[in-house]
Image (spheres, rainbow, N blue to C red):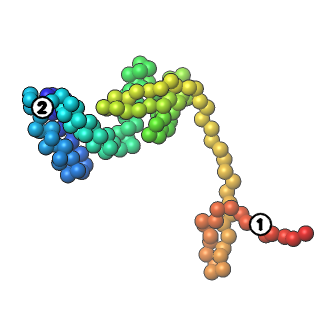
Amino acid sequence: MDKYKSFLKKLRELKNPDKAKDTIKLLESINTETPENQKREFAEQAIDLIEAELTANDTREILRNALKDKHLQEFGPFIIDWTDTWVVFELESDQAWKADYSIKDGKVVFGDAIKVIMKTVPVPVIEARKDKNGQYDIFQKEKKEPITGE
């Protein structure tokens, strides 16, 4: 029952608690006679709502804490970048690693990490041209060269 109480607490703290109203009612209705499969279904609904509201910073902190627990280093890891499916991080060794991950029930499951090299690619600056009204065309994507015939 404590597990369901923690779900209720998190659901009530959501930024938009109205969308969790029905799930809150379901969780509040759980008692000793509620079938196990129904309890699991209610819990899954709660988890889906809670995880759907994770901010980017929430995800970063969850990933960092999970990596810290996994690698047991005094400093770090430093999260370089992440998406919904992978994270690139640096350990004390100054080596960058990339690992796939998933978050299920608030727990992070990592795939095998591979060493990666971070690469910055310089892109040429395109000169802005004035349009016919004398305004700079700042949205010009590429420098246009006139087409000449042979």
The image quadrant of residue 41 is: top left
Label 2 crowd (10 A; few <14 / some 14-19 / many >=20): few
Closer-to-camera residue (68/22): 22
- Residue kind at label 2, given as amino acid type: Thr
Residue at x 87%, y 71% (from the top left corner): 149
Left or right of 74 in this view: 20: left
Q: Earlier in the sequence, mark 1 or mark 2?
A: 2
- At label 1, counting other C-alpha atoms closer than 10 Å, the crowd grade (few under 14, some 14-19, many 20 or more) is few
Q: Position of residue 60 (x, y in %)?
A: 40, 37
Give whichever of 49, 142 is nearer the camera. 49
Q: Percent x, y for residue 121?
A: 65, 44
Q: CA distance from mark 1 to mark 2?
A: 73 Å
Q: Is residue 80 visible?
A: yes
Q: Residue extending furthest top?
A: 72
Q: Secondary structure at mark 1?
A: loop
Labels 1 and 2 touching (C-beta < 8 A)? no
Counting from the top left corner in percent of width and height, residue 113 is at 52, 25
Please tell me the numbered disc located at residue 93. Answer: none
Check the image and name the residue furthest to the right.
Answer: 150
Judge by depth and name the residue closer to the eye, 100 or 57: 100
For the N terminus, the image quarter is top left
- Quarter of the figure with residue 40: top left
| Element marked by disc 2 | loop
Q: Can residue 89 be seen from the camera position used here?
A: no
Q: Amino acid at mark 1?
A: Glu
Looking at the rendering, in which quadrant would you find the C terminus? bottom right
Mark on residue 34?
Answer: 2
Q: Residue at x 50, y 24 (%)?
A: 112
Left or right side of 20 for 150: right
What residue is drawn where x is 23% and y is 50%? 19
Query: Residue 145 got which mark?
Result: 1
